[in-house]
Image (cartoon, rainbow, N blue to C red):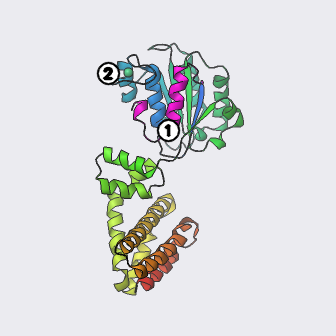
Amino acid sequence: MKLAEILGQERATTHLRQSMQQDRLAHGLIFSGPLGVGKRSTALALARALFCTQNPNEGCDGCEDCHLVEAGTHPNLLIQDMARAREEKSTASQISIAQIRRLRSDLALQGVRGRRKVAILEPAEKLTADAQNALLKTLEEPPAGCVLILVSNNADALLPTIRSRCQRVLFSPLTPSDIANILERRGSSTAEAESIAAIAGGSLQEAERLSSEESQEQSLHIRSRLDELPGLPLTDVLDFAAELASGKGEERRDRMTLQGTIFLDWARSRMKEAADVGDPERTRASLQILKRIHGTTRDLNHYANAQLTWESLLLDLRQMRG
Ligand SMILES: [Zn+2]
């Protein structure tokens, strides 16, 4: 992606473009902002802008440097992330000091394609304290032409000494219309893109998860169960609760978050329907249902007994709709 193709982060991209044009881009940058809003894509776009020979400071569609960055094989682009950490140790949960040492020696070598080098560390908050300390030396005396980009969802967790040596570039959550645009560009229908964007919480990553086939199927299933709720026998309601609460650990937490979003989305669309037909009684009832769901889903992951929580919510909803 070129810098101009990054959506929804005009403040960040304009700042980077101007810094390059005025030849005062910092050697150390922290790209700071929520997960899934385009920080890594922007880091790669910045690498293209810096390496590009046809359209410097921007990136083009024709030159070899741009193609190599896009293919992930540019020799002057150095990336240390969790994928690299796991190549070395399959159970790795942090970016190690060994990775930073390797990066330092790669940066010290003469560039294969010009002097410019770009290093991307992601997510920077996963660097061990030792790794961060090893990186300090590079930030203090950066080799000429090097730009280090620390991509972080939690920049405040970085060592203060790292933060003070880098310039922070802020990324904002994406607006629903930015996300809908991106999904449409990737082939979603307008209606689908808008409904997913509305519940993705400003994160493209979340939107991608919600638009996966598995999530779509789950969503249809839950919505039809909720529609049938007033007529469901008690045993079926309890089975539905057990199904919602199944699984464990992180996988269940993720699933419960998704389920909560589907419940809320279902309640919102009911409210919209009621408002569209101008039925104040139904609108009021739908609002009560929405509030009841919101009260539960807000803290879904903090309840000790997920099954009981779902049971009590479903039984309330069945009664409210009866
Ligand atoms: Zn180019």
- Dividing the image into four quarters, tell me where ligand 1 lies: top left
Above or below, 24 relative to 196:
above
Considering the image in quadrants, where does the C terminus appear? Answer: bottom left
Q: Which residue is mark 1?
A: 39
Give the residue drawn at x 32%, y 66%.
220
Above or below, 295 relative to 96:
below
Considering the image in quadrants, where does the N terminus appear? Answer: top left
The furthest residue to the front: 278
Confirm or deny contact between disc 1 and disc 2 (CB under 8 A).
no
Q: Is mark 2 within 8 Å of ligand 1?
A: yes
Above or below, 23 relative to 261:
above
Secondary structure, mark 1, is helix
In the drawing, what numbered circle is on residue 62?
Answer: 2
CA separation in Å, label 1 and label 2: 24 Å
Q: Report the side of 19 relative to 157 (left or right).
A: left
Circle 1 residues within 10 Å: few <14, some 14–19, many ≥20: many
Circle 2 residues within 10 Å: few <14, some 14–19, many ≥20: few
Q: Find residue 45 and report its horizontal and vertical position in percent.
A: 44, 30
**Camera-side residue: 262 or 112?**
262
Q: Quadrant of residue 274?
A: bottom left
Question: Which span of residues is magenta-colored?
Answer: 1-26
Secondary structure, mark 2, is loop
Q: Find residue 36 and report its horizontal and vertical position in percent.
A: 47, 45
Residue type at mark 1: give it: Lys
Give the residue drawn at x 34%, y 85%.
231
Q: Is residue 218 magenta?
A: no
